[in-house]
């Protein structure tokens, strides 16, 4: 996969035209082999959180997608209004990880989507959460620089970027990726921490 031709391309027309201030929530989930022990709890907590949001007062204006990445990137929950989100059935674990290339492609898609909404005089709120152990053994090295530049640009435009790391120093990785260092969270690898993270990401 080359991020320039990635599968992630969401149009403003996919957001209902009467919604003037849509909430866009995107989760990037590391599906490398090291994450396999936590897959079941990640899936169950995510599904429970999506059900809660779908019953909440902002459900009508909240749009969501879940992207898993390992050897390749996979849309696990297609971009749609949260009330239409289908439960995650399984996570596609892989021995390799395409971290920076996938992250760059998704951030670029979010920027394009929000640019379209702004041109339509709508005011989107966009949050992008990344959960990873920091390994990347597939992406071309140029994506690290491209991702860092794009992430820093989005922060000047009030995009909310959040990094959660498993077993790797969070601030160091955040600096590498261009994510904010003051809000990154370093997790002790455990089912409890994965469950907390999935729930925390999707809190209002």
Image (cartoon, helix red, strand yellow):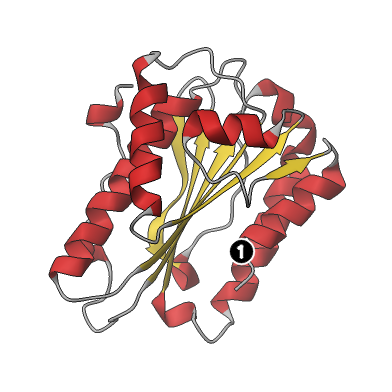
Residue 13 visible within the image = no
Left or right: 146 as drawn, with respect to 162: left
Looking at the image, is 111 positioned above or below residue 16?
Answer: above
Quarter assignment of residue 169: top right
| Residue named by callout 1 | 202
Q: Nearer the viewer, residue 164 or 63?
A: 164
Q: Position of residue 8 (x, y in %)?
A: 31, 42
**Secondary structure of the residue carrying numbered label 1:** loop
- Numbered disc total: 1
Left or right: 132 as drawn, with respect to 2: right
Q: Nearer the viewer, residue 126 or 190?
A: 126
Q: Quadrant of the C terminus?
A: bottom right
Q: Position of residue 13 (x, y in %)?
A: 19, 65
Q: Quadrant of the N terminus?
A: top left
Looking at the image, is 98 positioned above or below residue 23?
Answer: above
Quarter assignment of residue 54: bottom right
Q: Nearer the viewer, residue 186 or 61?
A: 186
Q: Residue furthest left?
A: 119
Q: Residue furthest bottom?
A: 57
Kindly identify the residue that appears in the image at 28 percent across and 69 percent down. 15
Kindly identify the residue that appears in the image at 62 percent across and 26 percent down. 134
């Amino acid at each position: 996969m080359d991020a320039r031709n990635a599968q992630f391309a969401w149009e403003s027309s996919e957001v209902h035209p009467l919604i003037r201030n849509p909430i866009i929530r995107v989760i990037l989930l590391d599906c490398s082999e090291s994450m396999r022990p936590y897959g079941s709890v990640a899936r169950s907590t995510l599904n429970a959180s999506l059900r809660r949001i779908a019953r909440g007062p902002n459900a009508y204006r909240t749009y969501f997608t879940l992207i898993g990445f390992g050897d390749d990137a996979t849309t696990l929950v297609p971009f749609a209004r949260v009330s239409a989100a289908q439960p995650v059935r399984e996570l596609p674990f892989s021995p390799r990880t395409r971290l920076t290339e996938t992250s760059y492609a998704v951030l670029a898609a979010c920027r394009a989507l929000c640019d379209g909404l702004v041109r339509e005089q709508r005011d989107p709120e966009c949050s992008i959460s990344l959960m990873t152990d920091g390994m990347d053994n597939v992406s071309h090295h140029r994506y690290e620089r491209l991702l860092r530049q794009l992430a820093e640009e989005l922060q000047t435009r009030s995009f909310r970027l959040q990094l959660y790391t498993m077993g790797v120093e969070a601030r160091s990785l955040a600096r590498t990726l261009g994510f904010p260092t003051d809000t990154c969270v370093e997790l002790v690898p455990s089912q409890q921490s994965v469950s907390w993270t999935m729930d925390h990401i999707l809190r209002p």
